[in-house]
Amino acid sequence: MYDIMATRTIYLTVRLDIDNPKADEITDEEVDEIISEVDYEFKNYGDYEIDTEICGQNDEGGL
């Protein structure tokens, strides 16, 4: 007997508003560090297990 498990992948766009009242500027290096260190994992919902991954960063000029 085989276990059946449905899987589906979707892509979401998430906006981060990053503020630092102690700084005059937030550098690209700081943004890269924040993105790599923050936990973006969604919690499981009912019987659904959710796994997240950062797949890239959008160009701010296009927004």
Image (cartoon, helix red, strand yellow):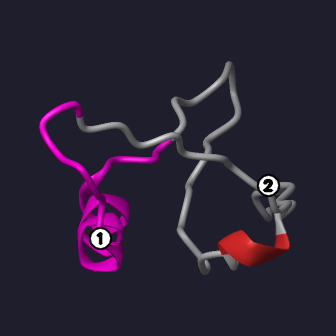
Say which mark, if any, is on residue 27. Answer: 1
Q: Is residue 31 magenta?
A: yes
Q: Position of residue 39 (x, y in %)?
A: 34, 47
Residue lying at 24% horizontally and 67% vertically, measured from the top left: 30
User: Is 23 inside the magenta-drawn segment?
Assistant: yes
- Above or below, comparing residue 4 to residue 18 in the picture: below
- Which element type, helix, strand or loop, lies under badge 1? loop
How many C-alpha atoms fall within 10 Å of the one at disc 2: few (<14), some, or many (≥20)?
few
Horizontal and vertical percent position of residue 54: 54, 69
Q: Residue at x 57, y 30 (%)?
A: 44
> Mark 1 Cα within 10 Å, few/some/many (few <14, many 20+)?
few
Q: Amino acid at mark 1?
A: Thr
Look at 24% across and 50% down and name the residue there. Answer: 24
Q: Amino acid at mark 2?
A: Leu
Q: Quadrant of the N terminus?
A: bottom right
Picture quadrant where residue 60 is located: bottom right
Determine whether the residue tagged by mark 2 lies in a helix, strand or loop. Answer: loop
**Horizontal arrangement in the rendering, residue 42 relative to residue 7 (left or right):** left
Q: CA distance from mark 1 to mark 2?
A: 25 Å
Quarter of the rendering containing residue 12: bottom right
Q: Nearer the viewer, residue 1 or 11?
A: 11
* Circle 2 residue: 12
Residue range in magenta is: 21-41
- Left or right: 5 in relation to 40: right
Quadrant of the drawing holding the C terminus: bottom right
